[in-house]
């Protein structure tokens, strides 16, 4: 249905879309260019520059050799990986139970879930509950925080409802209980929603900074987003103690604060960029290839 | 006992029997119930603190609406509510048409390199944290080295520090939100466009309709339902002006201009230790939020058949 020939309006629309894409692209690529520039030459890089000046990895060397940054990356990875596994498992198992046909008490449970969906607990109370459960300053607080997302639970329920009942019935006749049906039939058939929802959980866990900054206060429990915020928003350079020592061993005259900042931003973006192709493939593929379906 | 056994069997298994048969199911449900009760219901219940004076030792003393009265006598809180509503409304009205226009523009291009590139680039910001976005935007808007100011000075304008000027900070919030969500939010409209039956286009073309007519007479009417649904449901979230975003874009020069209910609660409760007052503000926000979400849900359900859940 889409017009094949190039007309003036179409050219104009194409130009506007290109401009929008550039506005989205250039600030991000500029950060990459800054991060990969040599500290002595980075000042030559303009805000519109997309190619590093004097390509070098020194900024990353400085950032990653800092034990505080290393610890923060480790903490973030722990929360993201362990948290996503817990979240996925519990979301799926709960969705399985809630999709059983003659489950007694399904209506009150669904009402319970709607209340949870629309009523957010207060920040102060969330803090106190973590405190009362002795979870403050423990990475587990962030694993448990928002562990089961109601929206994802509902998406998972809709998916499991689509699995043919006959498959599960057949297994039950062979003597399989609910647990076995769940592990042997539901889980293997749910690979794609598991992957998609898993991506969203992982990204939310990796990106969370507000609750991490409240629940995790000791320096050795800090996560990468909180550290990055100190660095970017609060312009607190004290997290980069130890630079001077590194300077002695390198042939760099002076480190560039903005370039170091850019390198930290890039480090925080890496997991997202790694997961992004999977999101495009499984979540948006239908929309991306829309033109073909017509 | 023997008499019970001789009773005719109930054709439907009794509820109790069903529950007993499904023991394992309830066991599988248990972690979720425990989780929600501990981390969601319990903190909601504890919000009763808004009606009590917080005491470190001993029981909290019931004071009724004292903290709410105090709250509404604080000029800052009135300002905070105004800020919340203004920032939310700016985002709601100004950002609403963008994903629709974006989807319509994208629809003019066939599946291929250009369309895909635009999509891959424009969906990405949705997945970046506000910390990262702030980092990118601080550089983007930097008065000395930022792209925007370099373009401004190229055309002979004075460079501006948009992040520290009260007149511009709210626009920065709107613009960065557009930057983050325009591409991703267009997906729902693109999906609606894909769902349009090709026979409609055929019929229109037979009738000699041009491109403009096809867009206004066929495509736009098909976007009406998602448009109404999204707009109505957005009203339900008007009390959320974007805590994560503001915490990352705030600084001393503009803080009062973008101080919203959430930042007020955070500051009063978690930084200043005024737990009861902060909880009262939070409860006020939550209750209004629940009323808005519920009413917009039913309104949307009535008008379009689609609600928030």
Image (cartoon, coloured by chain):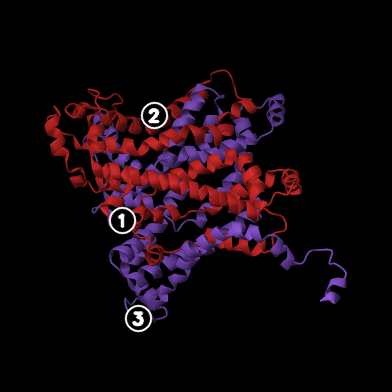
Chain colours: A red, B purple
Q: Position of residue A150 (x, y in %)?
A: 55, 54
Instruction: Tell me if residue B157 can be seen.
Output: no
Query: Which image quadrant: the C terminus of chain A?
Result: top right
Residue behind mark 2: A22
Q: Which mark is in front, 1 or 3?
A: 3
Foreground of the two, B218 or A133? A133
Figure quadrant of residue B80: bottom left
Q: Position of residue B293 (x, y in %)?
A: 54, 59
Q: Which mark is in front, 1 or 2?
A: 2
How many numbered marks are there? Answer: 3
Query: Which image quadrant: the N terminus of chain A?
Result: top right
Residue shown at 61% from the left, 54% from the top = B300
Q: Horizontally, is A103 left or right of B230 in the view?
A: right
Q: Which mark is in front, 3 or 2?
A: 3
Q: Horizontally, is A126 left or right of B201 in the view?
A: left
Foreground of the two, A188 or A43? A188
Foreground of the two, B223 or B212? B223
Circle 3 sits in a helix, a strand or a loop, which is it? Answer: loop
Q: Are marks 3 and 2 on the same chain?
A: no
Foreground of the two, A16 or A178? A178
Q: Position of residue A271 (x, y in %)?
A: 40, 37
Q: CA distance from mark 3 to mark 2?
A: 60 Å
Q: CA distance from mark 1 to mark 2?
A: 30 Å
Residue shown at 29% from the left, 58% from the top = B256
Q: CA distance from mark 1 to mark 3?
A: 39 Å
Q: Label 3 crowding class (10 Å Cα cut-off): few <14, some 14-19, many 20+?
A: few
Residue behind mark 1: B257
| Chain letter for mark 2 | A
Residue behind mark 3: B58
């Amino acid at each position: 249905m889409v017009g094949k020939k190039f007309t003036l309006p179409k050219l104009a629309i194409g130009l506007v879309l290109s401009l929008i894409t550039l506005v989205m692209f250039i600030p991000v690529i500029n950060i990459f260019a800054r991060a990969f520039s040599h500290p002595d030459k980075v000042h030559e890089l303009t805000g519109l520059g997309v190619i590093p000046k004097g390509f070098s990895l020194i900024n990353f060397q400085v950032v990653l050799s800092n034990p505080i940054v290393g610890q923060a990356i480790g903490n973030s990875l722990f929360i993201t990986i362990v948290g996503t596994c817990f979240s996925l498992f519990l979301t799926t198992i709960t969705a399985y139970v809630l999709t059983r046909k003659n489950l007694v008490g399904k209506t009150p449970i669904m009402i319970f879930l709607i209340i949870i969906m629309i009523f957010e607990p207060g920040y102060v109370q969330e803090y106190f509950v973590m405190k009362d459960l002795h979870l403050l300053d423990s990475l587990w607080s962030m694993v448990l925080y928002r562990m089961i997302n109601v929206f994802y639970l509902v998406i998972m329920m809709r998916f499991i409802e689509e699995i043919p009942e006959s498959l599960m019935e057949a297994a039950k006749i062979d003597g399989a209980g609910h647990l076995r049906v769940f592990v042997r039939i539901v889980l293997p058939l749910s690979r794609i929603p598991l992957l998609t929802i898993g991506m969203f959980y992982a990204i939310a866990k990796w990106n969370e900074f507000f609750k991490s900054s409240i629940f995790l206060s000791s320096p050795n429990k800090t996560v990468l987003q909180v550290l990055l915020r100190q660095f970017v928003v609060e312009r607190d350079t004290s997290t980069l103690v130890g630079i001077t020592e590194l300077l002695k061993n390198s042939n760099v005259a002076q480190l560039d604060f903005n370039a170091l900042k850019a390198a930290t931003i890039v480090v925080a973006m890496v997991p997202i960029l790694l997961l992004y192709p999977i999101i495009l493939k499984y979540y948006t593929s239908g929309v991306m290839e829309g033109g073909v379906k017509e | 006992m023997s008499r019970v056994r001789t009773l005719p069997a109930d054709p439907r298994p009794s509820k109790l029997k069903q529950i007993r048969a499904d023991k394992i199911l309830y066991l599988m449900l248990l972690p979720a119930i425990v989780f929600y009760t501990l981390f969601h219901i319990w903190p909601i219940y504890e919000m009763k603190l808004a009606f009590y004076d917080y005491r470190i030792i001993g029981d909290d003393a019931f004071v009724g609406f004292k903290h709410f009265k105090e709250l509404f006598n604080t000029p800052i809180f009135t300002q905070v509510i105004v800020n919340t509503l203004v920032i939310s409304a700016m985002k709601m009205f100004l950002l609403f048409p963008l994903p629709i226009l974006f989807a319509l523009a994208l629809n003019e291009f066939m599946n291929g390199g250009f369309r895909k590139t635009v999509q891959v680039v424009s969906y990405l910001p949705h997945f970046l944290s506000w910390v990262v976005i702030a980092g990118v935007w601080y550089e983007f808007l930097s008065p000395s080295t930022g792209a925007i100011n370099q373009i401004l000075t190229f055309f002979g304008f004075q460079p501006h520090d948009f992040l520290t000027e009260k007149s511009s900070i709210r626009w920065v919030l709107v613009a960065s939100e557009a930057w983050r969500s325009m591409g991703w939010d267009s997906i729902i409209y693109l999906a609606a466009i894909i769902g349009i039956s090709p026979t409609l286009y055929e019929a229109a073309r037979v009738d000699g309709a041009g491109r403009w007519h096809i867009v206004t007479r066929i495509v736009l009417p098909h976007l009406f339902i998602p448009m109404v649904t999204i707009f109505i449901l957005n009203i339900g979230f008007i009390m959320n002006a974007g805590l994560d975003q503001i915490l990352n874009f705030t600084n001393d020069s503009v803080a009062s201009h973008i101080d919203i209910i959430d930042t007020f609660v955070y500051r009063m409760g978690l930084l200043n230790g005024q737990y009861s007052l902060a909880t009262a503000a939070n409860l006020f926000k939550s209750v209004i939020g629940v009323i808005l979400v519920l009413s917009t849900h039913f309104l949307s359900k009535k008008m379009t058949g689609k609600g928030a859940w």
